[in-house]
Amino acid sequence: MAGDDAPPPVRGGWREIYRDLIASGRDLRAHRTPDDWLESALELADPPEGRRAVDLGCGLGSDLLRLTEAGWCAEGLDGETAAAEFVTSRYGIPVTVADLHDALPWPDAHFGLVTSRLALHVLDPDAAARTFAQIARVLEPGGVLAFAVNAASHRELGLQYDYRGAVEVAPDTWYLPGLDRRYLFYTPDRARRMLEDAFEVVTCEEREIEHFGIRKRVVTCVARRRPDTTVGAA
């Protein structure tokens, strides 16, 4: 149960992970596995022809590379300066350093495609609702959103994280004291509810993936912003 003594939302926490990945020298293009949810979003979106796309929580840029390969004018957003500097210096792709808890720093209808891999689950339900409204705002009418988030079964199966002493601080949102982080664990139904106000859901399903050698259960969604939906700043 959430309470007045619940820990604050986690902001960042990936500095050491990025440092180790950068130091390893691994080629992200060689380690990227095919993702049908991302590929289906690329097929669904109108031909890019110089149109803009953004990857939220872009990390070290593996999905940004795929977007640029597909012809998108891509940029990223990440909360860690080290990640942004790496992507910009290594691949020449611009990355904005910003927090997903804050309003997205772009004008309305700026992008034709928004992607996010394993980043939006750091937001609690209220913050996630605000961010999905922001995504709808910066997407063109008819623009495409594709994302992957941790599934509820990821926690139930005890995958990846240290769950000792975990506390549910909001619905489906768990604080993990061993990591000093909190995560919102999704079901497909929860993801659909997050999208229902502004998006037409094309696919939304739970699946198992491997991410940098880590077994994960995730929910992946591809959706299109409804052309007749009016969205404003959240």
Image (tube, rainbow, N blue to C red):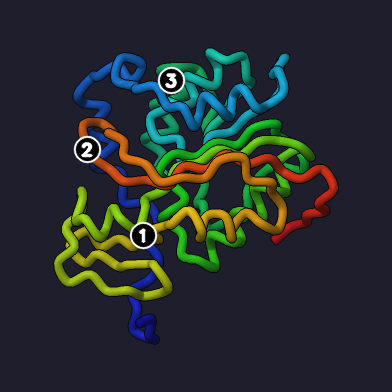
Q: Is mark 2 on a helix, strand or loop?
A: strand
Kind of residue at badge 2? Ile
How many marks overall? Answer: 3
What is the number of the mark on residue 214?
2
Q: What element carries label 1?
A: strand
Q: In this view, does 216 lie above or below 48?
A: below
Q: Earlier in the sequence, mark 2 or mark 3?
A: 3
Kind of residue at badge 3? Ser
Q: Which of marks 1 and 3 is nearer the N terminus?
A: 3
Residue 10 point in image, percent of width and height: 37, 61
Residue 26 point in image, percent of width and height: 24, 19
What is the number of the mark on residue 183?
1
The answer to the question of whether label 1 and label 3 lie on touching residues, with beta carbons closer than 8 A, is no
The residue that appears at 51% across and 58% down in the rendered structure is 189
What is the number of the mark on residue 13?
none
Q: In this view, does 167 lie above or below 62?
A: below
Q: Which of marks 1 and 2 is nearer the N terminus?
A: 1
The residue that appears at 72% across and 23% down in the rendered structure is 46
Q: Which of 54 and 84 is in front in this view?
A: 54
What is the number of the mark on residue 89?
3
